[in-house]
Amino acid sequence: MPAVSKGDGMRGLAVFISDIRNCKSKEAEIKRINKELANIRSKFKGDKALDGYSKKKYVCKLLFIFLLGHDIDFGHMEAVNLLSSNRYTEKQIGYLFISVLVNSNSELIRLINNGIKNDLASRNPTFMNLALHCIANVGSREMAEAFTADIPKILVAGDTMDSVKQSAALCLLRLNRTSPDLVPMGEWTSRVVHLLNDQHLGVVTAATSLITTLAQKNPEEFKMSVSLAVSRLSRIVTSASTDLQDYTYYFVPAPWLSVKLLRLLQCYPPPEEGAVRGRLTECLETILNKAQEPPKSKKVQHSNAKNAVLFEAISLIIHHDSEPNLLVRACNQLGQFLQHRETNLRYLALESMCTLASSEFSHEAVKTHIETVINALKTERDVSVRQRAVDLLYAMCDRSNAQQIVAEMLNYLETADYSIREEIVLKVAILAEKYAVDYTWYVDTILNLIRIAGDYVSEEVWYRVIQIVINRDDVQGYSAKTVFEALQAPACHENLVKVGGYILGEFGNLIAGDPRSSPLIQFNLLHSKFHLCSVPTRALLLSTYIKFVNLFPEIKATIQDVLRSDSQLRNADVELQQRAVEYLRLSCIASTDILATVLEEMPPFPERESSILTKLKKKKGPGKVPDMEETKKERNSDMNGSTEPVSVNSSAVTMSTPSTSTDLLGLGLAPVLNSVAPASAGGSLLVDVFSDNSPAVASLAPTAEENFSSPRIGSADVVSDDPAAAVHDADELVNKFVCKNNGVLFENQLMQIGLKSEFRQNLGRMYIFYGNKTSTQFLSFSTAVICQDALKTHILLHLFCITKQVDPAVDGGAQVQQILNIECVSDFMEAPILNIQFRYGGALQNMSVKLPVTLNKFFQPTEMTSQDFFQRWKQLSIPQQEVQKIFKAKHPMDTEVTKAKIIGFGVALLDMVDPNPSNFTGAGVIHTKNIQVGCLLRLEPNTQAQMYRLTLRTSRETVSQRLCELLSEQF
Amino acid sequence: MIKFFLMVNKQGQTRLSKYFEHVEIHKRTSLEADVIKSCLSRTKDECSFVEYKDFKLVYRQYAALFIVIGVDEAENELAVYELVHNFVEVLDKYFSRVIMFNLDKVHIILDEMILNGRIVETNKSRILAPLLVLDKMAES
């Protein structure tokens, strides 16, 4: 073995690197680098042809400079030349430059493809390997186009060298990753599977990686790999530690390959064939047995390698979730590791046990380790290990130990690392709700949470406690009493003021009989906190006050005095001022009956998945939160289940999906909005209540007036169009635009409206073209965009549209353009309405058209494997998350057209995911400012019946519904 | 899969970086700084796996040198941890000292061990085979 020492090779390079290392400052380093870059540039541009050695030296320097974080914008041509050289040393450095510096979009790719082609055809294994490494590293589309035909051939050809096969396997994997459409499956697939039998373990290692990825996409086609992998694994596991020679690592036979084989097997359910299954069980038992044997070496490498295999075997056991015996053994093994002195093992054991906890066979076994895990939470010195302990406690929690676990988590929260507090808060809130037998315990727990970690209690948490208190009569009095007591603390967290304000506003009357919590005392207590609070909380408190006016007529005058004070009526904050003005007015003019109706107790919230759970899932990413709904049905609490379904009240729906600070205001307003909102959205309840009192209606509207300048639909001035019809027809038009972004939106004798739009994440821009079809000028041309949903939430336009106004005069035959900026704040149902007004020949024209801004426009497609797809599909298994519709085909059922429509809808069309090839599956994420909603869809055509079945699963019921409505109109 | 491979000294200077998924160069420097910070700040008692954004870092320290590998959830942490050691043993077998002056050769070694983010070869003599061919050519 040649020992390479310092200075060997390129002296100039060594000098340069030493120079850089000796630089005292960043500036000096940059100066030195620029000098070197100038030098190299001049050398490359110079007349004198550089010899191979110099080229190599300079390219090495460039690599080093690149490594330091400086972009290299030249030298590529030299690298291409080196790559085409016949000398191995030069060729190698050329390839190195390309694979390190060139990204897959570079135009250089075309230039090097030729060199690669020659090398692949050279039959020189060293050259072929360089070329294959380059493809595997760069893997651009151009490369895929040029080489997908060749590489499978190289891979399965009988005379290919082993090392070339290895490179070819990974190369094919890369091309499959970047351009899956170009890599054809074919007769080579079965031969690839048989590479698992190859006598060379390097080849098997490479092939296993390739097969694992391909099997995730086409499980059927690679099913054969299961039995081959099992027999290969069995041969490795049972081999003596010296059998595999160089593939034995510290007395562990082929640990990396074993891990890969075990991973491959996790793409499949337990083998059906008895013999294979038996052999696999034997393998897994052997691996578990070996863990108990005395180590063959004291070196940590030995135990690490052995345990790498062991953990992977346990993953497979958990994945199969079918052998109670193995599951319990796995659990015991992990239990041993929980107390191991190696932190790495404790960490991995906690992590692994977390998934084990969700298996019904081993849940009880996992629970026996509760004391150890609680101890870990208290004593571990590494925050990431403590985090795993929290996760495991969360996963092992059920009704029997909920009180203990919640108490321990609350305990830990007092000293927990800041980085994980919010997550612990969410977990405590979820567990307390899920396993609450006694809701007073739940209320106490949440108030404790706010006391201990108020800053980390997100809105979801306190919204949820309010939802629950409102929905459960039995806990309302207790809650009022408890918050009242908690508010006595001289310094209490603002979140407590919010909860307290809201609950007393609704249920303060339940404790008002006690002279210690009389109405006035309640009011004074809340008002003593008022001045210390932020604007949103004050707004909420003002709503509480007006609710008090209804609950406690005896303190009406006191409250009116407060509302009337300059600090309220003339508050600099427009929201507070408006509330003060309107509440004061309401309290003065409305009769007791009207007050009682307007300020009625909030109706129950519709039962739904806790938004906290959604938030936790989002925080942890899919798959990390064990889905307890699904796996522990038998232990499910009655929280979401047993309460009788409540009628859905439109305002309650808006309130019960709180997720942002804007919604926070919505909730704060809830006591009043309950009745105001429907009125402004087109008028029902409030109009009835006030019948003849329209000024009051107007003055109640707490938002900016433009929301209320409702479209003047049905104006007598309209000559040519019935605008109501126009809006109605536009529904069809909106449907027309669901899967496309450009086209003619509207046309009549006078004008044509064209559209071009583009959307990216939660933002969109729409270009609207108004064409005057007549020869007469349009005068006073004006447009306005009205968002209907905005009226419901009052606070923020769900769709935030900013229009640039157009010129008031539009010449005959001319076209004007208007740009509309759109921001999707949260999910929405109604499309905004574009209202157009102008004078034509003396008559006022007024028309309204729905703008095709639909929720699906804010999709970002998501590519995923079949395994991921079904895993997520399973995670979204709560009934409300799924919406299904079966409908008749309106158009001829053409596969290509359907595909185009699904892609146009905005999701990624996932090929080969569904076992039935005639079905379509798609995945995407709806981006709004407040939340992102992942969405999976599946469309199953039935050509015989000319019907479709469309299923949508998202984490949000409203989103599932809306998307289903939109997409089902398309086929 | 393996997302990137970094060799960093205690001062936080990157000595070798290899990305298996394209990352813009200006993002590389900040990513590297971030990654290094989260590993350097850890003590010996803490475990060698760090959750970082949506992936995990597996790191191992050799005197003043840190080797950090970024992996997704489909990798086995301990296997990657030992891969680092295997890599170091290969370097030990080949180089007598400073590897910095032989960046190109380290890249060759890495290319033999990890391709497209997957472990491709673990047998030390086979990993070094192409380098030996290279050395033979240089001698002649």
Image (cartoon, coloured by chain):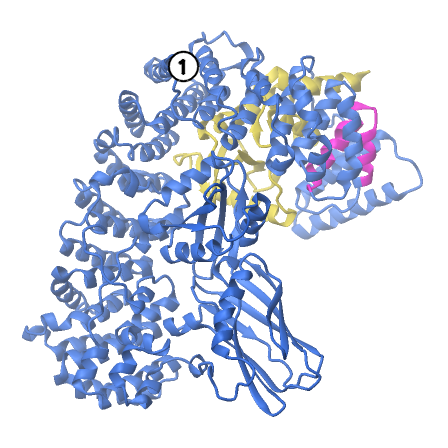
User: Which amino acid type corresponds to the residue marked 1 in the rendered image?
Assistant: Val
Query: How far across and down, in percent of the image, does residue A340 sit?
Result: 32, 27
Most foreground residue, B43 or B104: B104
Residue A127 figure quarter: top right
Give the magenta part as a residue range: A77-104
Left or right: residue A558 versus residue B56 is left
Residue at image coords 39%, 46%: A620
Q: Residues within 10 Å of mark 1 (few under 14, many from 20)?
A: some
Figure chain in yellow: B
Say if A847 sits above or below A215 in the image.
Answer: below
Residue at image coords 22%, 67%: A603
Most foreground residue, A312 or B18: A312
- Residue sitting farthest toward the left: A514
Residue at image coords 57%, 53%: A904
Say if A914 sits above or below A904 in the image.
Answer: above
Figure chain in blue: A
Query: How far across and down, in percent of the image, does residue A740 sit?
Result: 58, 58
Say if A697 sits above or below B54 in the image.
Answer: below
Q: What secondary structure is the stretch in magenta mostly built from? A: helix
**Is residue B89 in view from this perspective?**
no
Secondary structure of the residue carrying numbered label 1 = helix
Query: How far across and down, in percent of the image, does residue A805 sit?
Result: 60, 80
The subunit carrying tag 1 is A
Q: In which quarter of the image is the C terminus of chain B?
A: top right
Left or right: residue B127 versus residue A402 is right
**Is residue A775 in view from this perspective?**
yes
Left or right: residue A807 versus residue A125 is left
Query: How far across and down, in percent of the image, does residue A863 sit?
Result: 53, 43
Q: Does the magenta stretch include residue A837?
A: no
Which residue, given by chain and number where applicable, does mark 1 sit on? A276
Say if A69 sits above or below A490 in the image.
Answer: above
